Amino acid sequence: MTQLLVIKDKIRDIFRKYDKIFIIVLKFVLALIVFSTLTKEIGYDERLAKKSITLILSAVSAFTPGAFMVFLASILSLAHIFAASKILAALFLVIIAILYFLFARFSPRYAWVIVAIPVLHKFHLAYMVPMILGLIGTPVASFAVIVGVVVTFLISLIKEAATIAAGTAFAADDILALYTYVIKSFTGNKKMIAMAAVFIIVLFITYIIRKLRIEHAFEIAIIGSTLLTIILSLVTGITFGRFDSTGAMILGSVASGIIAYVVQFFRFVLDYSATKKVQFEDDDFYYYVKAVPKLRVSSPEVNVKTISKADAGEDEEETDSYEDGLEEPIDGADKDVF
Amino acid sequence: MITNEKLRLMTRMTIFEESEEGKEAIRIGHYFKHDYIRWELIKTIISVTIAYVLILGMVVLYKLEYLIANALVLDYRGILMKVLGIYLVLIVIYVSGAVIGYSYKYNRERRNLGRYEKSLKRLSGIYKKEETK
């Protein structure tokens, strides 16, 4: 266990050194996955489906806030759907607007969830989103989860409708028929409601467990949420129809659990490892300060000296509680002031 | 005069001010609680109303054939009551949720700001001491 923490520490050192580059590269790769998947699914506009466009959009997303990527993804989706059918594009826009006004605006911090769920669903890994949100987020993220799930089904529906729309003339009857088909498929979709319900329940249960003041709360939360995802998905699958094949769902849930564990293991790296460079002034001086976070596990040279099992257990407990202490962003040396 | 304590306070306060958490806490700290909640409530009501109008439009379009066919015999009063009724229920749910949610958020951000403000006071005290010396 201590070895793992020492490895984590070493990785954190590397990350700390190159953190800005790491983050840009990570954002670029994630954006590339999102835009590539989007283009693959609904890339109806040939000009916009070019790899160069995907690369440019990913590059822009690498240097801008996460919410901007969601915005770009929405615009790109709309543009592609517009190329397939103007009616569908209008419908897509209205539904997105409704989702925004009723749900998305209440969890702006979780805008990334709205693209993560549809994209990950293609790889049967969407289950990790409520798990991760339960571990590092708050229940407010449920709003973003609902939007993410709806967008997932909306895109599938648009794909189906686009093939119908291809043969549609712009007669009022045809437009109305297409519109009615989409709305009927959308509102009658029990699988979508079931998936949203499963995700929200998993999010809440994971959140509740990890907030418990027990040892290994995170690990228990991950195992619990993986099992819960499988059970709930099986139950809703039998009742409302599966939104994923059973094998893929089980594998996906387990893989999601593993990924969630890795994410939680490294989450402090992203929040606290970055060296902060700040500038400020007072009446007399300008200050240029480099603040290097001091989050260190004891080095191996110290731990090797531990002989008895009891001592090793104590060290581990201290490490655990030290990690718990990291939930407070400012170190607890002086709890009242910074 | 540069002292470790001054430097520590100023650095941590700047880190807080530049963090996402800090920016949000400072932004919300400018409002009184009831002003903040009232403003968020207004935005919520407007958003829900826009969404409801859009949904209503979609429903009308969906049932257009039926509406046109029965335009003369429709119970307009009944439909209006139903439409308004659903709207009111929706507003009540969202307003209750918003009041609870934004109240909680305001309290949480104020707590975050509390430590920052204490640091500010302490720093101010240090400067005053230096001036009187």
Image: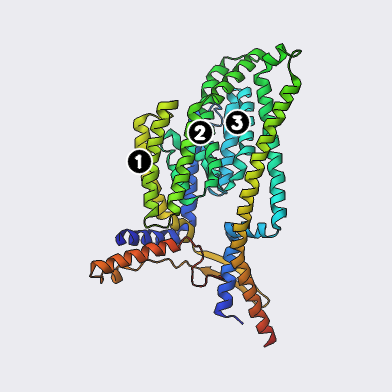
Number of residues whose C-alpha sits closer than 10 Å to that of mark 1, classed few (under 14), some (14–19) or many (20 or more):
many
Q: Earlier in the sequence, mark 2 or mark 1?
A: 2
The alpha-carbon separation of the residues under discs 2 and 1 comes to: 25 Å
Q: Work out which residue is located at the far top of the displayed protein and give it.
A: B69
Q: In the rendered view of the protein, which quadrant contains the N terminus of chain B?
A: bottom right
The secondary structure type at the circle numbered 1 is helix
Determine whether, in the image, residue B95 is placed left or right of residue A115: right
Q: Earlier in the sequence, mark 2 or mark 3?
A: 2
Vertical position of residue A279 compared to residue A253: above or below: below
How far from the left and from the top, in percent, is residue A191? 48, 28
Mark 1 vs mark 3: tell me if same chain. yes
What residue would you read off at disc 2? A38
Numbered disc 1: what chain?
A
Which amino acid lies under the numbered mark 1 shown in the image of this protein?
Val
Residue B129 seen in render: yes
Q: Amino acid at mark 3?
A: Ala
Residue A56 seen in this snapshot = no
What is the C-alpha distance between the residues marked 1 and 3? 36 Å
Mark in front: 2 vs 1? 1
Q: Secondary structure at mark 3?
A: helix
Q: Position of residue B131 (x, y in %)?
A: 69, 84
Residue bearing mark 1? A254
Q: Residue at x 52, y 42 (%)?
A: A113
Badge 2 amino acid: Leu
Quarter location, residue A224: top left
Q: Residue furthest bottom?
A: B133
- Residue identified by numbered label 3: A79
Q: Residue at x 35, y 68 (%)?
A: A298
Which of the two labelled residues, at mark 1 and mark 3, occupies the earlier sequence position? 3
Find the distance from the CA under tag 2 to the CA under tag 3.
12 Å
